[in-house]
Amino acid sequence: MSRIGKMPIPVPEGVTVEIAPGNRVTVKGPKGELTRTFSPEMQIDLVDGQLIVKRPSDERMHRALHGLTRALLANMVTGVTQGYRKDLEIRGMGYRADVVDGRLIIQVGYSHPVEFVPPPGITFEVGRSGRNISVQGVDKELVGLIAAKIRDVRPPEPYKGKGIRYVGEWVRQKAGKAGRVA
Protein backbone atom coordinates (compact mmCIF):
# COMPACT_ATOMS: atom_id res chain seq x y z
CA MET A 1 0.00 0.00 0.00
CA SER A 2 1.24 3.49 -0.79
CA ARG A 3 2.40 5.33 2.32
CA ILE A 4 1.22 8.64 0.87
CA GLY A 5 -1.90 7.34 -0.87
CA LYS A 6 -3.38 5.56 2.15
CA MET A 7 -3.23 8.64 4.42
CA PRO A 8 -6.64 10.31 4.79
CA ILE A 9 -6.92 14.04 4.02
CA PRO A 10 -8.68 15.95 6.80
CA VAL A 11 -11.16 18.51 5.44
CA PRO A 12 -11.15 21.57 7.76
CA GLU A 13 -14.24 23.51 8.74
CA GLY A 14 -15.33 26.02 6.12
CA VAL A 15 -14.14 23.83 3.24
CA THR A 16 -16.63 22.00 1.05
CA VAL A 17 -15.69 19.14 -1.27
CA GLU A 18 -17.91 18.03 -4.14
CA ILE A 19 -17.13 14.83 -6.03
CA ALA A 20 -18.94 14.71 -9.38
CA PRO A 21 -19.15 11.74 -11.76
CA GLY A 22 -15.92 11.09 -13.65
CA ASN A 23 -13.85 12.01 -10.56
CA ARG A 24 -14.26 15.76 -11.07
CA VAL A 25 -13.47 17.19 -7.63
CA THR A 26 -14.32 20.78 -6.60
CA VAL A 27 -12.87 22.16 -3.38
CA LYS A 28 -14.24 25.47 -2.05
CA GLY A 29 -12.73 27.33 0.87
CA PRO A 30 -12.17 30.78 2.35
CA LYS A 31 -9.35 31.65 -0.11
CA GLY A 32 -11.02 30.42 -3.30
CA GLU A 33 -12.16 27.45 -5.34
CA LEU A 34 -10.23 24.75 -7.23
CA THR A 35 -11.53 22.11 -9.63
CA ARG A 36 -9.61 19.18 -11.05
CA THR A 37 -10.46 15.96 -12.86
CA PHE A 38 -8.66 12.85 -11.63
CA SER A 39 -8.20 9.45 -13.20
CA PRO A 40 -11.52 7.57 -13.31
CA GLU A 41 -9.71 4.45 -12.06
CA MET A 42 -9.11 5.99 -8.62
CA GLN A 43 -11.95 5.94 -6.10
CA ILE A 44 -12.30 9.19 -4.11
CA ASP A 45 -14.67 9.21 -1.12
CA LEU A 46 -15.60 11.81 1.50
CA VAL A 47 -16.11 9.94 4.80
CA ASP A 48 -16.54 11.65 8.21
CA GLY A 49 -14.86 14.88 7.12
CA GLN A 50 -11.91 13.10 5.49
CA LEU A 51 -11.04 12.46 1.87
CA ILE A 52 -9.94 8.90 1.19
CA VAL A 53 -8.35 7.69 -2.05
CA LYS A 54 -8.48 3.99 -2.97
CA ARG A 55 -6.95 2.12 -5.89
CA PRO A 56 -8.48 -0.87 -7.70
CA SER A 57 -5.36 -3.06 -7.81
CA ASP A 58 -1.63 -3.23 -7.06
CA GLU A 59 -0.75 -2.68 -10.70
CA ARG A 60 2.22 -0.32 -11.20
CA MET A 61 0.15 2.43 -12.81
CA HIS A 62 -2.50 2.28 -10.07
CA ARG A 63 0.19 2.51 -7.36
CA ALA A 64 1.62 5.62 -9.03
CA LEU A 65 -1.80 7.23 -9.48
CA HIS A 66 -2.75 6.46 -5.87
CA GLY A 67 -0.06 8.65 -4.30
CA LEU A 68 -0.36 11.32 -7.00
CA THR A 69 -4.13 11.66 -6.59
CA ARG A 70 -3.86 11.92 -2.81
CA ALA A 71 -1.07 14.52 -3.01
CA LEU A 72 -2.97 16.67 -5.52
CA LEU A 73 -6.13 16.53 -3.39
CA ALA A 74 -4.15 17.52 -0.28
CA ASN A 75 -2.62 20.46 -2.19
CA MET A 76 -6.10 21.59 -3.23
CA VAL A 77 -7.38 21.54 0.37
CA THR A 78 -4.28 23.38 1.63
CA GLY A 79 -4.54 25.92 -1.19
CA VAL A 80 -8.12 26.96 -0.45
CA THR A 81 -7.43 27.21 3.31
CA GLN A 82 -3.91 28.69 3.58
CA GLY A 83 -2.85 29.46 0.01
CA TYR A 84 0.64 29.11 -1.46
CA ARG A 85 3.47 31.60 -1.77
CA LYS A 86 6.82 31.64 -3.60
CA ASP A 87 9.35 34.35 -2.78
CA LEU A 88 12.03 35.55 -5.18
CA GLU A 89 14.80 38.09 -4.78
CA ILE A 90 16.52 40.31 -7.33
CA ARG A 91 20.28 40.92 -7.14
CA GLY A 92 22.15 43.36 -9.34
CA MET A 93 22.85 47.06 -9.62
CA GLY A 94 19.79 48.88 -10.95
CA TYR A 95 17.65 45.74 -11.02
CA ARG A 96 14.19 46.24 -9.52
CA ALA A 97 10.54 45.28 -9.72
CA ASP A 98 7.25 47.05 -9.18
CA VAL A 99 3.53 46.21 -9.21
CA VAL A 100 1.33 48.53 -11.30
CA ASP A 101 -2.41 47.78 -11.52
CA GLY A 102 -1.78 44.18 -10.44
CA ARG A 103 0.82 43.64 -13.18
CA LEU A 104 4.46 42.89 -12.30
CA ILE A 105 7.03 45.06 -14.08
CA ILE A 106 10.67 43.94 -13.82
CA GLN A 107 13.72 45.94 -14.89
CA VAL A 108 16.75 43.67 -15.00
CA GLY A 109 19.24 45.20 -17.42
CA TYR A 110 17.38 44.80 -20.68
CA SER A 111 16.59 47.76 -22.93
CA HIS A 112 12.93 47.36 -21.96
CA PRO A 113 11.01 46.45 -18.80
CA VAL A 114 9.54 42.94 -18.68
CA GLU A 115 5.85 42.81 -17.78
CA PHE A 116 3.88 39.92 -16.27
CA VAL A 117 0.08 39.92 -16.30
CA PRO A 118 -1.08 37.55 -13.56
CA PRO A 119 -3.47 34.74 -14.51
CA PRO A 120 -6.72 34.55 -12.51
CA GLY A 121 -6.04 33.54 -8.91
CA ILE A 122 -2.44 34.86 -8.79
CA THR A 123 -1.32 38.05 -7.07
CA PHE A 124 2.07 39.73 -6.92
CA GLU A 125 3.64 41.67 -4.07
CA VAL A 126 6.91 43.59 -4.18
CA GLY A 127 8.88 44.66 -1.09
CA ARG A 128 9.62 48.31 -0.35
CA SER A 129 13.14 48.00 -1.73
CA GLY A 130 11.83 46.68 -5.07
CA ARG A 131 14.09 43.65 -4.73
CA ASN A 132 11.74 41.07 -3.19
CA ILE A 133 8.92 39.55 -5.24
CA SER A 134 6.18 37.37 -3.78
CA VAL A 135 3.87 35.24 -5.95
CA GLN A 136 0.68 34.16 -4.13
CA GLY A 137 -2.32 32.03 -5.03
CA VAL A 138 -4.44 28.99 -4.19
CA ASP A 139 -3.12 26.64 -6.90
CA LYS A 140 0.32 25.27 -5.93
CA GLU A 141 1.16 24.24 -9.49
CA LEU A 142 0.30 27.65 -10.95
CA VAL A 143 2.18 29.59 -8.24
CA GLY A 144 5.32 27.53 -8.91
CA LEU A 145 4.96 27.91 -12.68
CA ILE A 146 4.62 31.71 -12.54
CA ALA A 147 7.56 31.96 -10.10
CA ALA A 148 9.69 29.85 -12.46
CA LYS A 149 8.75 32.06 -15.43
CA ILE A 150 9.74 35.17 -13.46
CA ARG A 151 13.07 33.56 -12.56
CA ASP A 152 13.67 32.68 -16.22
CA VAL A 153 13.60 36.38 -17.18
CA ARG A 154 17.14 36.73 -15.76
CA PRO A 155 18.42 33.59 -14.02
CA PRO A 156 21.32 34.13 -11.59
CA GLU A 157 24.65 34.10 -13.36
CA PRO A 158 27.62 32.30 -11.74
CA TYR A 159 30.28 35.05 -11.88
CA LYS A 160 28.73 38.04 -10.10
CA GLY A 161 25.53 36.38 -8.88
CA LYS A 162 23.29 38.95 -10.59
CA GLY A 163 19.77 37.95 -11.57
CA ILE A 164 16.50 36.68 -10.10
CA ARG A 165 16.63 33.76 -7.68
CA TYR A 166 14.38 32.05 -5.16
CA VAL A 167 14.82 33.22 -1.57
CA GLY A 168 17.33 30.85 0.01
CA GLU A 169 18.62 29.55 -3.34
CA TRP A 170 22.37 29.13 -3.33
CA VAL A 171 24.24 29.90 -6.57
CA ARG A 172 27.79 28.58 -6.85
CA GLN A 173 30.21 31.39 -7.69
CA LYS A 174 32.91 30.77 -10.30
CA ALA A 175 36.37 32.28 -10.04
CA GLY A 176 36.45 34.02 -13.40
CA LYS A 177 39.63 34.30 -15.46
CA ALA A 178 42.42 32.26 -13.88
CA GLY A 179 45.30 34.21 -15.44
CA ARG A 180 44.16 37.58 -14.15
CA VAL A 181 46.69 39.48 -12.04
CA ALA A 182 45.27 41.55 -9.18
Image: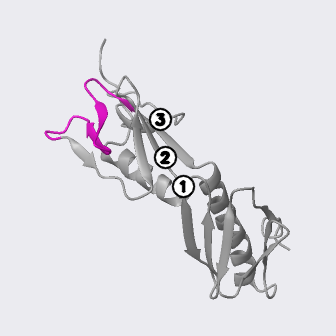
What's the amino acid at mark 1? Val
State the residue position of label 1: 138
Residue type, mark 2 in image = Gln
Q: Position of residue 121 (x, y in %)?
A: 45, 56
The answer for how far apart the CA atoms under marks 3 and 2 are is 24 Å
In this rendering, the label closer to the viewer, 3 or 1: 1
Which of the image's four quarters has the N terminus?
A: bottom right
Q: In the displayed orientation, state which residue is furthest to the front.
A: 14
x and y percentages locating residue 147 in the rendered image: 43, 48
In the image, what residue occupies the spot 25% across and 47% down? 115
Image-based side of 113 in relation to 173, left or right: left
Query: Residue 15 has which mark?
Result: none
**SS for tag 2?**
strand
Task: Based on the picture, tell me whether residue 161 belongs to the magenta stretch.
Answer: no
Q: Depth check: 68 or 177 in front? A: 68
Which residue is painted at 31% across and 46% down in the image? 153
Indicate the quadrant where residue 102 lies.
top left
Residue of label 2:
136
User: CB of mark 3 within 8 Å of CB of mark 2?
Assistant: no
* Label 2: few (<14), some (14–19) or many (≥20) C-alpha neighbours in 10 Å: many
Residue at mark 3: 171
Q: Is residue 169 above or below residue 51?
A: above
Look at 48% across and 53% down and name the residue there. 143
Q: Tell which circle, 3 or 2, labels the residue nearer the N-terminal end.
A: 2
N-terminal of the pair, mark 3 or mark 1, is 1
3 and 1 marks in contact (CB < 8 Å) = no
Check the picture and name the quadrant holding the C terminus. top left
- With 166 as the anchor, is 59 left or right in this view? right
Residue 101 within the magenta-colored segment of the rendering: yes
* Rendering coords of residue 101 (x, y %): 28, 43
